[in-house]
Image (cartoon, grey):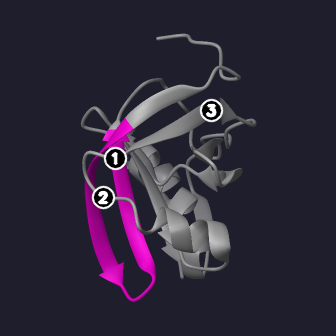
């Protein structure tokens, strides 16, 4: 599905999973294809629009992992299944997929590395993850 990434899409929140205090994953229906390393802009009506890395894109769902950091992310963590948010993207250039990769991440930076690790595994490419 090749759609204009600049076009705002209104997507319904399908599921919200809490991983710990101030850390959740939001799941949306998958509106597009993307590569690990790309990001989307999330728009909360009447609030703002901010970029978020894609945590995963599998099973027909888009996953965004969010950590409460400021006013916008804290507000985003209030989203519930059935809510609608605006999504633009994907933007950016994805990571090159190479075997024997070492993936290093910490904190919420693990989210886009997780997507990359899943894609490398699906392609049978060797890699190590260092947290």
One can see residue 41 in this view: yes
Mark closer to the chain start, 1 or 3: 1
Residue 47, x across and y down, in percent = 65, 55
One can see residue 110 in this view: no
Give the labeled residue for mark 1: 83
Give the labeled residue for mark 3: 90
Disc number lying in front (3 or 2): 2
Q: Main SS of the magenta segment?
A: strand
Give the labeled residue for mark 2: 80
Q: Is residue 86 left or right of residue 59?
A: right
User: How far apart in space, not on screen, are marks 1 and 2 (Cα)?
Assistant: 6 Å
Q: Answer whether labels 1 and 2 touch (C-beta < 8 Å).
A: yes
Q: Quadrant of residue 95?
A: top right
Q: Residue at x 58, y 45 (%)?
A: 45
Disc number lying in front (1 or 3): 1
Q: Secondary structure at mark 3?
A: strand
Instruction: Reply above or below: 51 against 111.
Output: above
Q: Answer whether labels 3 and 2 touch (C-beta < 8 Å).
A: no
Instruction: Reply above or below: 78 against 39.
Output: below
Give, as a single range, the part of the protein colored magenta. Answer: 12-28
Q: Residue at x 38, y 59 (%)?
A: 79
User: How far apart in space, not on screen, are marks 1 and 3 (Cα)?
Assistant: 21 Å
| Farthest-out residue, front | 46
Mark closer to the chain start, 3 or 2: 2
Q: Is residue 26 magenta?
A: yes
Q: Residue at x 61, y 44 (%)?
A: 43
Residue 11, x across and y down, in percent = 41, 34
User: How far apart in space, not on screen, are marks 3 and 2 (Cα)?
Assistant: 23 Å
Residue 15, x across and y down, in percent = 24, 53
Residue 117, x across and y down, in percent = 46, 55
Using a 10 Å C-alpha cutoff, classify the residue at mark 2 as few (fewer than 14 neighbours), some (14 to 19) or many (20 or more).
some
């Amino acid at each position: 599905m090749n759609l204009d990434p600049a076009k705002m899409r209104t997507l319904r929140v399908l599921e919200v999973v809490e991983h710990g205090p101030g850390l959740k994953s939001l799941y949306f229906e998958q509106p597009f294809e993307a590569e690990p390393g790309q990001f989307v802009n999330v728009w909360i009506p009447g609030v703002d629009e901010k970029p978020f890395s894609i945590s995963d894109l599998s099973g027909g769902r888009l996953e965004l992992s969010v950590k409460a950091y400021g006013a916008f992310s804290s507000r985003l963590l209030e989203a519930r299944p059935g809510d609608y948010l605006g999504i633009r993207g994907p933007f950016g250039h994805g990571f090159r997929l190479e075997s024997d990769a070492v993936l290093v991440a910490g904190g919420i930076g693990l989210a886009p590395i997780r997507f990359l690790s899943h894609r490398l595994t699906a392609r049978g490419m060797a890699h190590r993850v260092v947290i």
